[in-house]
Image: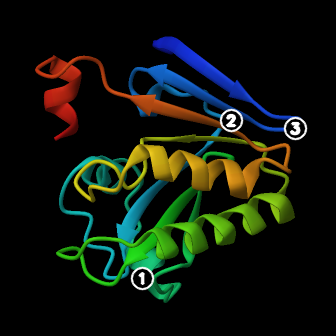
Amino acid sequence: MNMGKTEKLYQSTNWTLKYVTGDLFSCPRDESLAHCISEDCRMGAGIAVMFKKKFGRVSELKEQKKLPGQCAVLTYDQRFIYYLITKKKASQKPTYVNLRESLEDMKSHCLENGVNRISIPRIGCGLDQLLWSKVSKILEQIFKETNISITVYSLPCVGSKLQMHAM
């Protein structure tokens, strides 16, 4: 299992935000995963396509009837897969407010279910075009008083086989 290269680490009293270069899906199997999707659960572009292929169960996500600012959840192989609903339709762009609210919803689920490790891509910053400088601050504000560690995966240099596979 290729864990990639750890680049930098931010640590507060209880939580950590760690950066790794590598494939998100190579994270330890006991870590939950999270990414952003639209309310319509289309998942037709970006890393969402890979989540859809790997975990499926789109009808189960739709049955949860989650709205922007909420978080849908699947259980897979002894871990949770979080689907942050950050916009109504796939063709729209998310807002920081919806991202924050969906992360708060995910945090509540994590605390209720003993989740303390989550791996994510740079949520909202790929096709959705949010700024990582703002997103990382939101993550810090929401999780800094918890024991939930977050590992942020970034793909290696543009043009690599992994980068092409993720598109």
Task: Give the Cα separation between the discs numbered 2 and 3.
Answer: 19 Å
| Residue 1 seen | no
Residue 8 vertical position relative to residue 141 in the rendered view, above or below: above
Mark 3, secondary structure of its residue = loop
- Lower position in the chain sequence, tag 1 or tag 2: 2
Give how far across and how far down residue 91 sits, in percent. 17, 75
First of labels 3, 1 by sequence position? 3
- Front: mark 3 or 1: 3
Q: Is residue 53 above or below residue 117?
A: below
Callout 3–callout 1 Cβ contact below 8 Å: no
Query: Which residue appears at 77% of the width and 44% of the height?
Result: 148
**Residue 32 sits in which quadrant?**
top right
> As drawn, is 44 to the left or to the right of 41?
left
Q: How many marks?
A: 3
Going 31% across and 55% down the picture, which residue do you hit? Answer: 48
Q: Is residue 160 left or right of residue 36?
A: left
- Circle 2 Cα neighbour tier, 10 Å, few/some/many (<14 / 14–19 / ≥20): some
Residue closest to the eye, 42 or 5: 5
> Where residue 145 sits in the image (x, y, percent)?
85, 50
Q: Is residue 61 visible?
A: yes
Which residue is identified by label 2? 30
Mark seen at residue 14: 3
Residue at x-position 50% and y-position 21%: 20
Q: Amino acid at mark 3?
A: Asn
